[in-house]
Image (cartoon, rainbow, N blue to C red):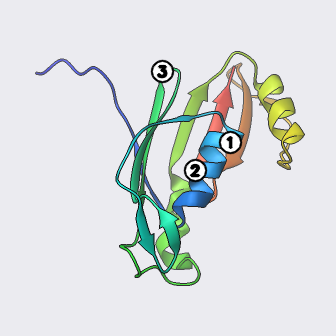
Amino acid sequence: MPQMTGCVPLFQVFDMPTSIHFYRDMLGFEIYQHAPEVETAEGRFFHWCWLRNGPVELMLNTAYDSNERPPEPDAARWAGHGDVSLSLGCANADAVHAELTAKGMTLDPPRTSPHGPRELYLRDPDGYDLCFRS
């Protein structure tokens, strides 16, 4: 069996600039790598990127090729995103809540789970579930 050294989830996103704003500007991820930028009917962006925040890594890829994205997300296609959850370790879920609400996010406060950790739940722009645990 090969020794594994990491795991990087890949999320399909509807609108890359919206997702970049969320992950970079709101959650503090940095763009580690990205595909070349393209100019499309939907705007200027890249179709794929690799994000990092400390040891946490995530890749994003547009769900549609250039000039093929519909005006609105297809609800049936995105419905399954709610079944996908990332559990993100953090030093203090309450501090994460305070920082994100200061940036304008409307979030329920963290709660203490039955098994002990404080948990802050939110959804990204594409409906993926994120849980900050401390």
CA gap between label 1 and label 2 equals: 7 Å
**Residue 55 has which mark?**
3
Lateral position of residue 129 relative to residue 55, left or right: right
- Amino acid type, mark 1: Asp
Q: Residue at x 61, y 43 (%)?
A: 23
**Residue 20 has which mark?**
2
Q: Earlier in the sequence, mark 1 or mark 2?
A: 2
On the image, the x and y values in percent for residue 48 come to 38, 53
Judged by depth in the image, the label closer to the viewer, 2 or 3, is 2
CA gap between label 1 and label 3 equals: 18 Å
Q: Which residue in the protein does label 1 denote?
A: 25
Q: Residues within 10 Å of mark 3 (few under 14, many from 20)?
A: few
- Amino acid type, mark 3: Pro
Q: Earlier in the sequence, mark 2 or mark 3?
A: 2
Judged by depth in the image, the label closer to the viewer, 1 or 3, is 1
Q: Do the numbered discs 1 and 2 sit on residues whose CB atoms are within 8 Å?
A: yes
Q: Secondary structure under badge 1?
A: helix
Lateral position of residue 91 relative to residue 129, left or right: right
Q: Quadrant of the C terminus?
A: top right
On the image, the x and y values in percent for residue 113 come to 73, 28
Q: Is the residue 56 above or below the residue 126 in the image?
A: above
On the image, the x and y values in percent for residue 2 come to 13, 21
- Amino acid type, mark 2: Ile
Q: Quadrant of the N terminus?
A: top left
Q: Secondary structure under badge 2?
A: helix
Q: Residues within 10 Å of mark 2 (few under 14, many from 20)?
A: many
